[in-house]
């Protein structure tokens, strides 16, 4: 057991005791509220002690991690950008190729039937097979790529999007409230929130 681990044992007992006290505590009058302030302050002091012990370990590790990230960032940024650019180009090419193939196959299928300019079913099948299918798996000596179809989206008209698909921007709302900007559909109210000083 390390020295820090040994030091945490009494701290853990005290935290558990205070947490248990906070959980069972009821506030029914001003005297209880004053006692709650005392418990809250003790919990926050305990939190400070925990943070102090934890940072003895985490601060040097965080600094080392920060330094390692800064060292490799000049290599990672262009590498990640190049991958993103190449993937987008490959995706655009393959998407267009599949679209054109499907379009051509649909034209052929649309010509199946009886009469002038129409194709027999067997002839249509043969012509569709001639169109071919875009390769989903491409392998080289250095690696391979598999293409898979993924459904994606873009918003064309936000006013037509059902409300359950829209998300509230809480940060923007709180900023507007601070600036006394009224927002339709938002009720602003006040509540008392305890801020503890120790």
Image (spheres, helix red, strand yellow):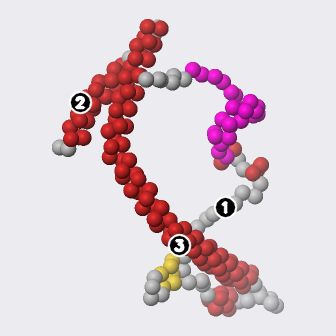
Residue 79's disc number: 3
Q: Is residue 198 magenta?
A: no
The image shows residue 155 at horizontal and vertical percentages of 72, 57
Name the residue that disc number 2 marks: 10
- Element under label 2? helix
Q: Residues within 10 Å of mark 1 (few under 14, many from 20)?
A: few
Mark 1 or 2, closer to the camera: 2
Left or right of 1 in this view: 181:
right
Report the span colored magenta: 166-192
Residue displayed at 47% across by 81% down:
144
Alpha carbon of mark 1 to alpha carbon of mark 3: how far? Answer: 27 Å
Name the residue that disc number 1 marks: 153
The image shows residue 162 at horizontal and vertical percentages of 70, 47
Residue displayed at 76% across by 31% down:
182
Secondary structure mostly taken by the magenta-highlighted segment of the chain: loop
When asked about the image quadrant of residue 152, the answer is bottom right
Among numbered discs 3 and 2, the one appearing first in the sequence: 2
| Contact check, label 3 and label 2, Cβ < 8 Å | no
The image shows residue 127 at horizontal and vertical percentages of 67, 90
Q: How many marks?
A: 3
Among numbered discs 1 and 3, the one appearing first in the sequence: 3
| Contact check, label 1 and label 2, Cβ < 8 Å | no
């Amino acid at each position: 057991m390390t020295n820090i681990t040994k030091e945490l044992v009494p701290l853990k007992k005290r935290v558990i005791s205070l947490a248990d006290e906070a959980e069972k505590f009821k506030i029914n009058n001003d005297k209880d509220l004053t006692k709650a302030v005392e418990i809250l302050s003790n919990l926050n002091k305990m939190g400070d002690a925990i943070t102090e012990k934890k940072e003895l370990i985490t601060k040097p590790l965080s600094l080392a991690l920060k330094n390692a990230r800064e060292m490799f960032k000049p290599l990672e940024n262009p590498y990640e950008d190049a991958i993103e650019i190449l993937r987008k180009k490959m995706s655009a090419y393959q998407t267009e190729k599949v679209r054109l193939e499907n379009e051509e196959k649909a034209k052929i299928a649309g010509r199946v039937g009886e009469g002038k300019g129409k194709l027999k079913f067997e002839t249509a099948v043969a012509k569709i097979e001639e169109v071919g299918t875009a390769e989903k798996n491409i392998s080289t000596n250095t690696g391979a790529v598999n293409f898979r179809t993924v459904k994606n989206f873009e918003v064309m008209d936000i006013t037509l999007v059902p409300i359950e698909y829209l998300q509230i921007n809480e940060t923007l709302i709180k900023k507007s409230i601070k600036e006394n900007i009224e927002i339709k559909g938002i009720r602003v109210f006040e509540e008392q929130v305890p801020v503890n000083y120790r």
